Image (cartoon, helix red, strand yellow):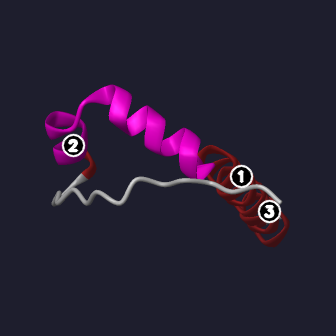
Amino acid sequence: MMMIHVRNKHFVASSIKDVFDNIETQKIIDFIKETRFISKLNVFILMFVICFFYSILIALILHS
């Protein structure tokens, strides 16, 4: 069984720009590593790309 320790510290930000402007870069990187956010983000990006190309394919089929 693997245990993952995630920091219990909250940051308040109104935008992504606000996050990167006010929080140290290393803390953001550590958070991403600890929460395995990167692997979840990769899945999201892959799904987005598949949907994007699928919609282009449908548009091309309907247009012809």
Residue 27 vs 14, above or below: the answer is above
Q: Nearer the viewer, mark 1 or mark 2?
A: 2
Q: What residue is shown with label 2?
A: 17
Which of the marked residues, 2 or 3, is nearer the chain's N terminus?
A: 2
Q: In front here: 21 or 51?
A: 21
Q: Residue at x 23, y 45 (%)?
A: 19
Question: Gap in Å between the C-alphas at discs 2 and 3?
Answer: 31 Å
Q: Quadrant of the N terminus?
A: bottom right
Question: x, y (%) of residue 35?
Answer: 56, 52
Q: Which residues are magenta?
A: 17-37
* Occupied quadrant, residue 2: bottom right
Report the disc number at residue 28: none
| Direction from residue 33 to residue 59 in the image, left or right | right
Q: Amino acid at mark 1?
A: Val
Dot 3 alpha-carbon crowd within 10 angstroms: few under 14, some 14 to 19, many 20 or more: few
Q: Earlier in the sequence, mark 1 or mark 2?
A: 2
Q: Earlier in the sequence, mark 3 or mark 1?
A: 1
- x and y, in percent, of residue 45 in the image: 66, 51
Q: Residues within 10 Å of mark 2 (few under 14, many from 20)?
A: few
Which quadrant holds residue 38? top right
Residue 54 or 44: which is nearer the viewer? 44
Label 3: which secondary element: helix
